[in-house]
Amino acid sequence: MGLIKEHNMSKFYVHVAGVLDFTPDEKLIKEMEAANAVEQKGIEEKLEDAKANLGDMEVRDFLLERAELFARIGDKEAALEAYDETMKISSSLGQKLDLVFAKIRLGLFFNDIELVQKQVDTATEMLTTGGDWERRNRLKVYEGLYKLMIRDFPRAAELFLSGLATFTCTELFEYERFIFYTTVLSLVALDRKTLREKVIKAPEILSVYDKIEHLPELMNNLYDSNYSGFFEALVGISSTIKADYYMCRHYNYFVREIRIVAYKQFLESYMSVTMESMAREFGVSTDFLDKEISHFIAAGRLTAKIDKVGGAIESSRPDAVNTHYQATIKQGDQLLNSIQKLARVTNV
């Protein structure tokens, strides 16, 4: 509310009232709208003067100022229209890309996935015709954040890692937050060898990751196979994930996926292990572990089976050659069926 009042965010205040289901203060709305009207009038007067007496550069500056006013007060539709109007008078590719980035930020702010996707695609297409190095690197972070929002963690991790050494998008979040996203996404998206090479040994991550509570323990305990410490760190970092604007919506998915990573890593070391010893390694009860492992096995996420009588888990390593062979046979059968259906149609 302090920021809403400070920046006269009238449209956003009404939006928040609708989302959180409370009755907005009509007096406050009128005061903010009056202040916005005065500011907009001042911009319009400068814009008209620029059109009459100045050049295209000055006209563009005032068009952009008007667009940023609409964006600041939370008037998304008016801001998009104003950015489009500014785009028409923008001459350089860099200026146009900056406007596309502004529209992406607007979509991110309002959680408008469709708008974000459209503008990311637009920026990608524009950069095929040119564009400077700095904006190409910024697009990696913007696209990575979009991939995070749609739960494409592997692609998001790849994009964030490629932008580690060149991060400049402080308009989205601080560098520490960027490292947080890069690390937690990499934990569920990368294999153990790649994780060590690109994350654990990365100087960019090592320089700041200890500023994020529980993140060093989560990463190092997982890699070092200290599973009880890993589970403790996962519990500790849960509040940070739940409080994060972009990660909170994926909390259950992330916690499930990172547990699967830990279980897979543990079971790869054994042909057979007792449920009791595995539960002791993870610092959980055997009943909890039995329920967890059986669920993941049934879902096809773990290649193992539970010997309930012997109280053991037997892991099986899939044969890659046999898997490819079975997949080829299955695809061949589907192709033959399709050809037979086509033959019957053509014969008729």
Image (cartoon, grey):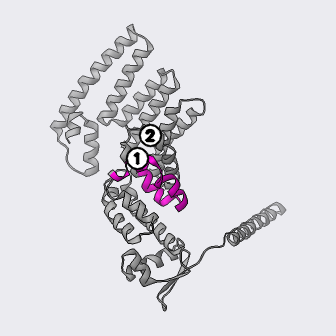
Q: Looking at the picture, tell me which residue is in the foreground, 338 or 144.
A: 144
Q: Nearer the viewer, residue 43 or 100?
A: 100
Checking the image for residue 218, the label placed there is: none
Residue at image location 43% in from the left, 11% down from the top: 55
Region in magenta? 181-210
Residue situated furthest bottom in the rendering: 309
- Residue 216: give x, y in percent of width and height: 38, 58
Name which residue type carries label 2: Phe
Question: Which structural element holds mark 1?
Answer: helix
Residue 268 at x, y percent in the picture: 54, 73
Residue extending furthest top? 53
Mark 1 in CB contact with mark 2 (< 8 angstroms) = yes
Q: Earlier in the sequence, mark 1 or mark 2?
A: 2
Q: Residues within 10 Å of mark 2 (few under 14, many from 20)?
A: some
Vertical relation: 293 (above or below) 133 = below
Residue 255: say if magenta.
no
According to the picture, the residue beneath numbered tag 1 turns out to be 178
Q: Dot 2 lies on which element?
A: loop
Q: Which mark is residue 167?
A: 2
**Residue 191 in view (yes/no):** no
Instruction: Name the outermost residue toward the right.
Output: 347
Question: How far apart, in angstroms, are the residues tagged by discs 1 and 2?
Answer: 8 Å
Along the horizontal axis of the image, is 52 left or right of 23?
Answer: right
Residue 266 placement (x, y as % from top left): 49, 73
For the N terminus, give its image quadrant. Answer: top left
Q: Amino acid at mark 1?
A: Phe
In reply to whether residue 203 is colored magenta, the answer given is yes
Nearer to me, 130 or 284? 284
In the rendered image, the quadrant that contains the C terminus is bottom right
Q: Position of residue 342 (x, y in %)?
A: 78, 62
